[in-house]
Structure formats: structure tokens, C-alpha cells
Image: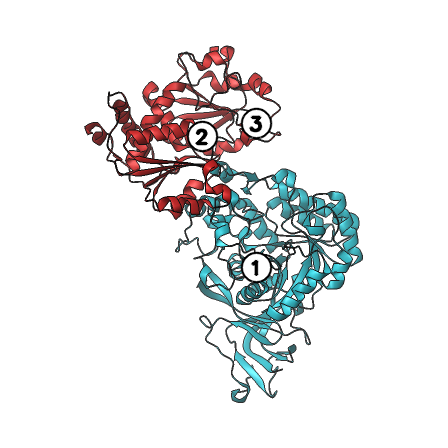
Chain colours: A cyan, B red
Amino acid sequence: MKSLLLTGGRVIDPANGVDALANVFIENGKIAGVGPVAGVGAEGVEQLDVSGLVVCPGLIDIHVHLREPGQTAKETVATGTAAAARGGFTSVVCMPNTSPAIDNPGTVALLHELATTQGVVNLWVAGAITKNIAGEELAPIGSLKKAGVVAITDDGHCVQNNELMRRALEYARMVDLPVMDHCQDYSLVTDGVMHEGYWSTVLGLRGWPAAGEEMMVARNILLAETTGARVHCQHLSTARSVQLLREARRRGVPISSEACPHHFTLTDAAVAGSERFWEADGKGVAGFDGGSERPIWPPYDTNFKMNPPLRSAADRDAILEGLADGTIEILASDHAPHCDYEKEVEFDYAPFGITGLETELGLALSQLCHSGRLDLAGVIRKYTAAPAHLLGLAKGTLSLGADGDLTVLAPDLEWTVDNRAGASKCLNSPFHGWHLKGKAVVTIVGGKLAWMDHAKFAGSFLPAESRRDKTL
Amino acid sequence: MNWSRKHLLDVQSLTAEEILTVLDTARAFKAVGERAIKKVPALRGKTVINLFIEPSTRTRISFELSEQRLSADIINFTAEASSLKKGETLKDTARNLEALNADFIVIRHRASGAPHFLSRVLNASVINAGDGAHEHPTQALLDMFTIRERKGNFQGLKVTILGDILYSRVARSDIWALSKLGAQVTLCGPATLVPRVFEKMGCRVTYDVEEAIRDADIINLLRIQHERQRQTMFPSLSEYTGLFGLNKTRLAGTKPDALIMHPGPVNRGVEIDSEIADCPRSLILEQVTNGLAVRMAVLFLVNGGKGPQEVAAS
């Protein structure tokens, strides 16, 4: 295998507390050196000059829907992992709400095979908590663990029976798997299609109260405390969820959480159309306060329908605060592709979910970093060291000998989202036409180039014979 | 004259001037309806499709007759007879209808926002005949027409809307129209059906029915929509009648010139005592008559009609 040397970049590796100008040297697909003289003098090395850019451990998204098996009109392992590479992600964790569900070792093995033959980036599998994600009987959690799942979740659904959830946690703890939960109390949420509040009232859409999430976050805190199992609350969306998590973590409860860019960028006003959103809640969007060109969209646009729903401005602010103070450790996309013909229907009938892999980094950098809430290392940690730690992955670090997964970022690069230009099979992102600041330009997986943004990055690999040593 | 809209999707986005333009135009059409020959050629050669995805009687009939009186060609399309049952999407159904060169689509749908969606995917003019719990703009416009005929103007007028507000598209359209025209709106009904969040739309919310109607100039009653509700919303219809129903005793505590409205269908003995529904203070049947003129006005205006003068000349 060829060796690879990235020269001149600002290396940010939160796992090792590194933030310095350095070369990164990869040999045989593993990190072989990070430092001012790393790789200098080595033979047969391909070289990429990344001066002015940031090099970090390959980003990890622990919450994506790749739709295989069974829903390949929406996405496949091939297209979903290609979208991941374009977004700067070198590892993704796919959710088990497929058809059939990933609730048995055979389906896990199928995913691993697809990852090997079709995957553009590393793929990790989350198994189901219950058989067929039906919330009635435990899935074979021990066998799933042996088959290689890194967590269990009924994502898209939520185990309603508290006793069953308690047993799942006890069992998962035995086999040392974290349990990720999509927090939604069905009896409170009923048939809600958006956040319950002023805008659902005006639009005449059925509301999904914030308490419908918070009830389950509270349940999970109590059960994590009771069982000692590690529980991870997925895609937090409300202020009181953040408050509950903050208190629980202070007490030492083994509970963690993630947030998605749409929940800390948009609000429920967006469902009423861009005009109302910018007027009511536009101030909370980084980069748009100066009245620069604002994206437009109509009322009842189903690309603003997701689960959990877009919440109030106060909820959005609380999620941002929770990310800034460390309560929410992890960033993820909840990448949920749906076909045009599924989304181009009445709001009530459209499926929940939006794509996210190709926009999440730009949104996170815009909303968290450029707004001054977090430094660059803080954002990178939530995409690298933190998710790797949660799932016990040997990823998210540039330690010597670690896998050669790298992301090269241009944190100040301004760009415009174009849904049609993406690699995902689907176009259901609400951020089409948004101007964002910061994006990945090179994605390297296991020492090999997975993707390079040729439009935004003028660099190219110099072959081994033409390289010149560069020291810093 | 102040109208340049191609669609009528909701009242929320209309200005007070636009609402008054509809009312003025409707007044001219009401006069047409009192002639021996009630038909005008305004929409001759135009095709209107009445796309009723949710069952409706009075609104559908009112639209049909309005269209006939404007000399339009009409196709009536109901969900029961349609391909929607075979899995065709609304977009495909509507585009197929548009391929018949329809000029107007009047849509009634149980999903809020369906008319907005259609207006984005079609070239035809879209008129909202009621969408889910969102809006019912022509009902509000006919309510405004009826109120103006009886009360003259809206400034400072006190209007109480009583009943199921949460699930009511009529309530939302009325609230927007009344607020834009300067009336004061009070909402009353069970707390589960009249949440406080409506205060943010500029209304007063109270759960004391006697207090709610005491100073009202207009009492607009809404039907309890069993079909949209869950069992958890309130204990029983009889408890509703006891707490909120309009009866003789309660009516005695109102201003003598307070008038009673209801968009129908009326559930006699539930939200209103039967004899009150038929009393001289009830405007229920006038609303139906006025609905025809208002719907003619709306079709006329979205077709590019130039206001009441042109109607009077026809």
C-alpha cells in the first residue's frame, strides 16, 4: 500500500489535545506520524499540500439511515457512504429500521458485506432493541453483539413498555453495548406532525408536544441510573431535554446525547415558510443576521418535516447552549433520505426525515464555530473523539497506529448547498440554496482518497517521484 | 379595487383592503342573485374543477351554483370516485385534471396545506374550500359579508367564537379576517379545544361562557367536530351542552342586538338550542345565501375580474 503525506495543515486532534501546524504521515493505511517533520525522508510517498486547511481525524456520524436492505429507492450503502465521503465523514453508523429490520445476525452480516463491496467509507451497524422494531420482544442482543453491532436502537420508533426497556438495558449492559433511544412517548405525541405551539396552531397541523420527548428522556435517565447501562438519547430537540440531561450527567448517570444541525438551526416557524421563519426566528441563524441573501421556501414544505420536529426558538437556543457547555457531547445528522414522490404530497402524509450527511458539517461550523459558541476543536471533538468513545470504536484519533482516516476542512470556505449536486439518492434537504461557511474538501479513509472537492480545492496529489520534502 | 391574486389559499395572507374588495364585489353579485336572470357570462368558456377530497355538502353545492351562475364549465370530482383510492398521489391526480385544461381548482381536503401544495405544482388557480384544521377562507369571507350587512363596520365590534376552536378551520379564518378588519375576538369553549396559544393570534380566551357572550355583538357558534377528535378531548356532548351550549337563559344575558351565526351543519341541542337556531337573531340561513355571492366574487376576482363596477355593468 502506498504511503501518504499531508503537508502544511493545521492538525486538530482533540483525542490527543493537538492543535498545531504539522504534517500527517500515513503508511500502510495507518497513522505513522504527526508532527513538523513527520514523513520527511520516507520513500515512495504521495504528497498533498494542505497549507491553510485543517486536518483532523476522520469524522464519524453515528446516526444515518442507509436504507439497506429493502428501501433502495431511497438510498443504498453505495450512495449513502458516497454522500458521507462528500460531507467529510469517514465512518457512519447505520440505523436498523430497514426492511427487514437489522434485528438478526444475518442482516448484520449482509450489511458488513455490502460495506466491503460497496462502501466508500467505514460502515458500522446498529442493531435493533426489539424484534422487528415492534417494541414487544427483545431482539437477540447477544447474537447481534457477536455479529458486530456497535449499539442497539429501535430508532424511528421508541420502546414504549418501560419494563421491556429496563430489561433491554440490563441485557445490553451484560454484553457491553450502549443503547441509543429515539425518545418519543406515543401516547403524548399521538399523530402529531410538527412541534405543538403557535405555528402548529396557525397552520392547523397536529402538534407533537415537547413533553412527548422529555418524558422519555426522563425515563431513560431513571432507567440508566437503575440498571447502570449506558444510554444515549438520540437527536435531542427540546430545552427541557437538555436540562434533564445536564442534571443527570452532573449526578454521574451514564447517559449521553446527540444533536442534529436542523434542530439547532431551524425552528417550527420554518414550516410556515421562509418569510415567516426569517421574520420570527431568523436572528438565530449564524451568518444571516446581516440580511444577506436569504433562502426561500413555501409554507407546508415537507422538507421541514422530521421526527423529532423543528422546535421553538427557545428550544433551538437551549440545544446550542447544551452543545456549547458539553451537555450534548455528540453531533450527528439523522440522515434520512426519502424519494421525491414520497415527499411531494400533503404535509400530513409525507414521511418524516431529511438528508444531512453533506450539509451537517457546514451547518455545525456555521452555527457553533463561526457564531463563537465553540472553537473548531470543540466541534471536531463532537464528530470524532466523542462518538468513538461512546461506541468503543478505535477511530476518531490521530494516535500513532490508528486507522488512516482523515478529513481535511476549509473552515472559512463559503459555499452554497445544492441538493442536486449531492451523492445521496434523494434531494430532501431543507437547506437547498443555503450559504454556509466551512466544509470538508478531502476525505481519506484507511490511507486512501475517498473524495476530494475539486471545485473548491485546487490541490492534487503529487506522485512519489516528484515530491519535495517539506519541513515546517 | 385591490386584487391581484391568482389563488385564494388563506385569509392570513390577505390585507384588509383585499378582504373589503371581495365583500364589495360580493355585494354586486348579491344584487345579481336577486334579478330574474341570475346568470352572468363572467366565466364563460372557463373550466372549474371541484376537487373535494373530503366530504362536503353545503360548501360544494354553494361553489357549484356560484360557478354555474358565472357560466363556467364544471367538473365535480370526489374522493370516493377517484384514483386517490387506488394509490395515486394528489399531485398526479391534480396534474391529470389540469391536463384537461382546467382554469380553476376548488379544493376541499382533510390535510392542512393541501391547497398551498397544489398551487405550487399546478398552473391553474387554486381556491381553498377548506383544508384540514387550517383555513376555510370563503366561509370567513361570507361571515364578514354577513356581519357587515347587519352591523355596518367592524371597528370595535365584539365577536365571540364559541365551541371547538382547535380543530376548526372556520375559526382560524374568522380570527384572521376579524382582526384585520378591526374587530375584537373572544374565544370560548372547553380548555382542551380552546388552548391559550390562540391568544398569540390576537384573541382573548375565556372559559366562562356567560362572560364570553355578555358584551358580544356577534356570537359565532361552531360545531363540535366529533370526526376530528379523540375521546380524550372532553367527557361528553351532554356535558358540553351544559357548560357551553347556547340556550335561552344564556341568550337572556346578552345584548339585545347580539346576533347568532353558525357555519353549519348545526347540531341542534348540542351547541345551540333548537328554537334559538331559528329565532330572528339567527343569521344562519343568510350566511348560506351570502355564501353564493361571496364565492362568485372570489371566482370572479381570481379570474382577473375588475371589481364591483364591472359586475354591476354586466
Image mark 1: chain: A
**Is A279 situated above or below A147?**
above
Which residue corresponds to mark 2? B56
Residue A105 is drawn in which quadrant? bottom right
**Is B289 situated above or below B10?**
above
Q: Is residue B60 left or right of residue A133?
A: left
Q: Is residue A195 visible?
A: yes
Q: What label sits on residue B216 in the rendered view? A: none
Element at badge 3? loop
Which residue corresponds to mark 1? A72
Q: Is residue A14 visible?
A: no
Mark 1 crowdedness (10 Å alpha carbons): few <14, some 14-19, many ≥20: some
Residue type pointed to by label 2:
Ser
Q: Are marks 2 and 3 in contact (CB under 8 Å)?
A: no
Q: What count of labels does the image hold?
A: 3
Q: Foreground mark, 2 or 3?
A: 2
Decide which of A253, B311 is in the foreground and name it: B311
Q: Are marks 1 and 2 in contact (CB under 8 Å)?
A: no
Image mark 2: chain: B
Decide which of B118, B283 is in the foreground and name it: B118
Compute the Cα span from label 2 to label 3.
28 Å
Compute the Cα span from label 1 to label 2.
40 Å
Decide which of A50, A95 is in the foreground and name it: A95
Q: Earlier in the sequence, mark 2 or mark 3?
A: 2
Which residue corresponds to mark 3? B191
Residue type pointed to by label 3:
Ala
Element at badge 2? loop
Decide which of A390, A76 is in the foreground and name it: A76
